[in-house]
Amino acid sequence: MKATFQQLKTTFGGELTISMNEHILKIDSDFGKGVIKGVPLKEGISFLEFDMIFYSDLVLSINTPDKNPIYFTYCSKGELGHSFGSNGAKRTLESFQTGILTSRKAEENILYFNKNQKLKTTLITVQTVGDDSDSLKTKLRETFFKDSVGDNFVYIGSHNLKISEKIDQLNAIKQEGLVRSLLVQGLVHVILALEIQQHSDDSENGNQKTGSLTVSEMETIKEVSRFVNDNSDSQITITQLYAQFGLSPSKLQEGFKLMHGHTVTEYIREVRIEKAESLLKNTDMNISEVVYTIGLTSRSYFSKIFKEKYNCSPKDYKFAQRDMAMSA
């Protein structure tokens, strides 16, 4: 990882910082502007993220002559091109799509970045060298290399909003030091798991790529989600949302199911309950104040949905937090 970022710095310039093995290269040069982040993890896993605008078309070559890694790629914004070798067939990863690549040893993987396009893409690399039959790398090798490590393999998956949400959470981490390192590692593993699950789901469902949502509509679903998170204490209605963001109720529901696994109403409720839990844990508000703050009016309804999620009443939860503080 260190050698990779030194090479990137030599090529693009910029300011490189390293903390707890997390590498961050901030670039503002004739090549482009943005940030490249990377971190090596356990079990031969590494994570690389480009959040960039390049000022000219760019070709990046990845070559691992003595290894057979598996590359898990996800494009949150823009498009990313790929080919095996400079003369190979080129394929494109669109926004919200995941791609999985394996290649022959010494095969050159070419990545294509378009000029003047906002690009946000992640690359999780898993080295597959190892003989432990119980290890993650061995199980991945059995899944994606099948019976031969001599063939190139490409999978371009369905559009997946859940992965985009996890990447947003990864970039929203504010903690520093060891806590940050642990949170980053945990979320990278979640993202990897979601990409593997996407491959499994597509294999079972005939690779249904888009459903009825366009890429633009999926971008709008992310905007709606942010609006709900920022305004969960207001009385948000479906009518208000589709009037404000220009999506039909059916598109909204489909998008929220894709991204959050909930209907819009269920998601609003989840956001409120999670905010309530934080208020009960971190403030001196009583339960009535919490109910009012999260935008509900019925204390009994709040107690019901809180218990459904956390398996205890708000009152018991508040007492438990107080007892923990007193014994600390």
Image: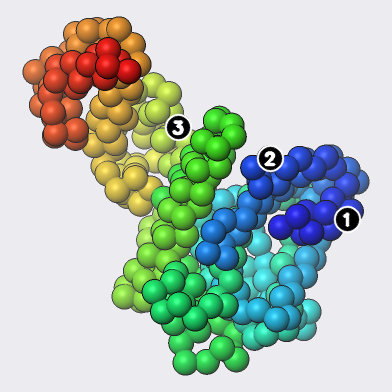
Which residue is identified by label 3?
Answer: 226
- Under mark 3, the amino acid is Arg
- How far apart marks 2 and 1 lie (CA) works out to 22 Å
Residue shown at 85% from the left, 42% from the top = 14
Total count of labels: 3
Quarter of the image where one finds residue 310: top left
- How far apart marks 3 and 1 lie (CA) works out to 36 Å
Image position of 213 with respect to 276: above or below:
below
- How far apart marks 3 and 2 lie (CA) works out to 30 Å
Residue 166, percent across and down? 46, 46
Quick check: 26 left or right of 287? right
Q: Are marks 3 and 2 in contact (CB under 8 Å)?
A: no
- Under mark 1, the amino acid is Thr
For the residues carrying marks 3 and 2, which lies nearer the camera in this image? 2
Residue shown at 76% from the left, 40% from the top = 17
Q: Earlier in the sequence, mark 2 or mark 1?
A: 1
Can residue 296 be seen in the rendering of this structure?
A: no
Q: Earlier in the sequence, mark 3 or mark 2?
A: 2
Dot 3 crowding, Cα within 10 Å, few <14, some 14–19, many 20+: few
Which residue is identified by label 2?
Answer: 19
Specify the quadrant that holds the N terminus: bottom right
Residue shown at 49% from the left, 72% from the top = 137
Quick check: 245 left or right of 325? right
Which residue is identified by label 1?
Answer: 11
Q: Are marks 3 and 1 in contact (CB under 8 Å)?
A: no
Q: Nearer the viewer, residue 267 or 47?
A: 47
Residue 26, percent across and down? 77, 40
Dot 2 crowding, Cα within 10 Å, few <14, some 14–19, many 20+: few
Of all residues shown, which one is farthest toward the front? 327
